């Protein structure tokens, strides 16, 4: 871990926009919805927590990090037992 890591240099708004655009493309695809309808909540959780993790790694934007973490948990409550959850918390608390 070093301060020049590209993930720490990412523009917050671009990161969020990129992930949310990807989510919209996937969620608006009828074929994906039909085939993977039972896993859509897992996909949403993954996207929201990806944003939360990368925001947490920057050490900034704690409120937004927490909001995206909560969105992920709402999609998949058992996410709180996954490694990414603890990584986000670790960096939120720092």
Image: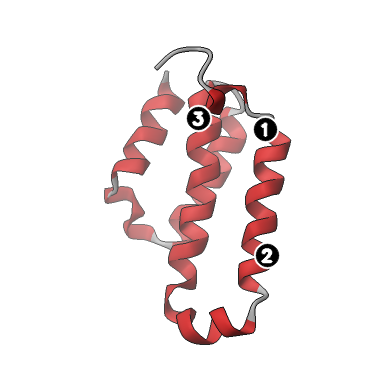
Q: Quadrant of residue 63?
A: top right
In the rendered structure, find residue 24 and report the number of the disc placed on it: 2
Q: Residues within 10 Å of mark 3 (few under 14, many from 20)?
A: many
- Mark yes or no: residue 71 visible: no
In the rendered structure, find residue 56 and report the number of the disc placed on it: 3
What residue do we see at 62% from left, 61% from top? 23
- Mark yes or no: residue 57 visible: yes
SS at circle 3: helix
What residue do we see at 69% from left, 29% from top? 11
Q: Would you place residue 36 above or below residue 42 in this image?
A: below
Kindly report the distance in space between the C-alpha atoms of the residues bearing marks 1 and 3.
11 Å
CB within 8 Å, label 1 to label 3: no
Q: Would you place residue 62 above or below residue 37 in this image?
A: above
Badge nearest the viewer, 1 or 3: 1
Q: Nearer the viewer, residue 14 or 89?
A: 14
Q: Mark 2 or mark 3: which comes first in sequence? A: 2
Q: Mark 2 or mark 1: which comes first in sequence? A: 1
Q: Residue furthest bottom?
A: 34
Q: Is residue 87 left or right of residue 35?
A: left
Kindly report the distance in space between the C-alpha atoms of the residues bearing marks 2 and 3.
23 Å
- For the N terminus, the quadrant is top left
Q: Nearer the viewer, residue 82 or 63?
A: 82
| Image x and y of residue 51, in percent | 55, 42
In the rendered structure, find residue 12 and report the number of the disc placed on it: 1
| Image x and y of residue 20, in percent | 66, 54
Q: Mark 1 or mark 3: which comes first in sequence? A: 1
| Image x and y of residue 44, in percent | 52, 61
Q: Is residue 33 left or right of residue 2?
A: right
Q: Would you place residue 23 above or below residue 15 in this image?
A: below
């Amino acid at each position: 871990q070093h301060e020049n890591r590209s993930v720490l240099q990412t523009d917050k708004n671009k990161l969020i926009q990129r992930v949310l655009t990807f989510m919209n493309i996937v969620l608006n695809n009828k074929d994906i919805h039909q085939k993977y309808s039972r896993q859509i909540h897992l996909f949403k959780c993954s996207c929201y927590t990806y944003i939360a993790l990368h925001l947490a790694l920057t050490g900034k934007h704690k409120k937004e990090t927490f909001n995206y973490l909560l969105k992920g948990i709402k999609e998949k409550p058992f996410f709180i037992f996954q490694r990414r959850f603890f990584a986000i918390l670790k960096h939120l608390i720092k």
